[in-house]
Image (cartoon, helix red, strand yellow):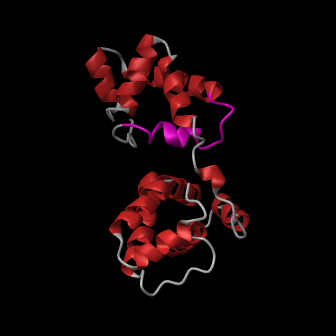
C-alpha cells in the first residue's frame, strides 16, 4: 500500500522517474483492478481500465495536478473510468447502480489491499485440500487448464472435475472466512495463468 510519501513519488514521476512510476504500479495495480472489478464484474475489463489509468498518468504527468493523495487520485480515476465505461455500454443493472451510489464518497481503499498474511494463508489453505482435489485446483489455478483439459490429463470425467473444483472453492471459502470478500479474487490472481473460461 502506498504511504504518506506518495506525493513525493508523484513528483518523481512528473520528472520522468520510471522507477518511481513502476513502484506505484506494482503497489497499486492489483488493488485498483479489484476495485474496478467491483464495478464491471469482469477481470479483462477491469484490467483494461486500470492499464488505461496508468497509461494516462504517465502520458499526462506534466499537466496532472493532485490535491489529495496519489492513491486517492488513482482510485478516483478508476471509478470515473468505470462509470464512463458503464454509461458508454448502457449497462444499467440495479447492482451496478447501487455500487456507483455507494462508492460516491469513498476515501478509504485499504480493503482492496491484501492483508500481509493473506497470500501465505491462501497457500496453506490450498495445501490442506485432499490430494486429488488439490491437484485439480492447482491445474486450474496455476496452469490455467480448462475443466475439459484437466479431465483428459487425469483421466477423469468433466463432471468429476467440476465437482472437485466446487468442493475446493467451498473449502477455501470456509478456511479463509476470516479474510475479506476479495480473498477469492486473490486466489485466482496470486499465481500462474488466469483461468477465466473454465468450461
> How far across and how far down the image is residue 116, in percent?
57, 40
Residue 8, above or below 37: below
- All told, the count of numbered labels is 0
Please say whether residue 16 is one of the residues in the magenta stretch: no
- The quadrant where residue 149 appears: top left
Tell me what residue is drawn at x 60 percent, y 51 percent: 112
Viewer-nearest residue: 129 or 109: 109
Q: Which residues are magenta?
A: 176-191
Viewer-nearest residue: 10 or 146: 10
Tell me what residue is drawn at x 52 percent, y 16 percent: 128
58 relative to 177 in the view: left or right: left
Tell me what residue is drawn at x 48 percent, y 55 percent: 27
> How far across and how far down the image is residue 117, in percent?
57, 35
Task: For residue 90, say whether it is visible.
Answer: no
Magenta: main secondary structure equals loop
Task: For residue 165, say whether it is visible.
Answer: yes
Identify the residue at the far bottom of this view. 63
Viewer-nearest residue: 166 or 80: 80
> How far across and how far down the image is residue 118, in percent?
57, 36
Please say whether residue 182 is one of the residues in the magenta stretch: yes
- The quadrant where residue 69 appears: bottom right
> How far across and how far down the image is residue 170, in percent?
59, 26
32 relative to 136 in the view: left or right: right
Residue 2, above or below 55: above
Identify the residue at the far left of this view. 153
Image quarter of the C terminus? top left
Residue 60, above or below 43: below
Image quarter of the N terminus? bottom right
133 relative to 149 in the view: left or right: right
Tell me what residue is drawn at x 64 percent, y 25 percent: 174
Amino acid at each position: 500500500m502506498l504511504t504518506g510519501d506518495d506525493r513525493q513519488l508523484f513528483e518523481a514521476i512528473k520528472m520522468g522517474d520510471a522507477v518511481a512510476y513502476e513502484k506505484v504500479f506494482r503497489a497499486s495495480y492489483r488493488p485498483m483492478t479489484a476495485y474496478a472489478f467491483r464495478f464491471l464484474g469482469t477481470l479483462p475489463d477491469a484490467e483494461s481500465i486500470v492499464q488505461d489509468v496508468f497509461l494516462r498518468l504517465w502520458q499526462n504527468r506534466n499537466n496532472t495536478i493532485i490535491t489529495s493523495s496519489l492513491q486517492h487520485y488513482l482510485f478516483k480515476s478508476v471509478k470515473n473510468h468505470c462509470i464512463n465505461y458503464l454509461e458508454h455500454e448502457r449497462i444499467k443493472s440495479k447492482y451496478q447502480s447501487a455500487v456507483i451510489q455507494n462508492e460516491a464518497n469513498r476515501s478509504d481503499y485499504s480493503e482492496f489491499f491484501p492483508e500481509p498474511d493473506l497470500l501465505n494463508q491462501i497457500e496453506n489453505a490450498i495445501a490442506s485440500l485432499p490430494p486429488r482435489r488439490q491437484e485439480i485446483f492447482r491445474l486450474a489455478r496455476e496452469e490455467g487448464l480448462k475443466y475439459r483439459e484437466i479431465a483428459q490429463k487425469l483421466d477423469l470425467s468433466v463432471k468429476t472435475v467440476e465437482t472437485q473444483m466446487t468442493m475446493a472453492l467451498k473449502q477455501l471459502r470456509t478456511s479463509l472466512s476470516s479474510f475479506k470478500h476479495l480473498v477469492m479474487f486473490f486466489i485466482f490472481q496470486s499465481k500462474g495463468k488466469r483461468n477465466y473460461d473454465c468450461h
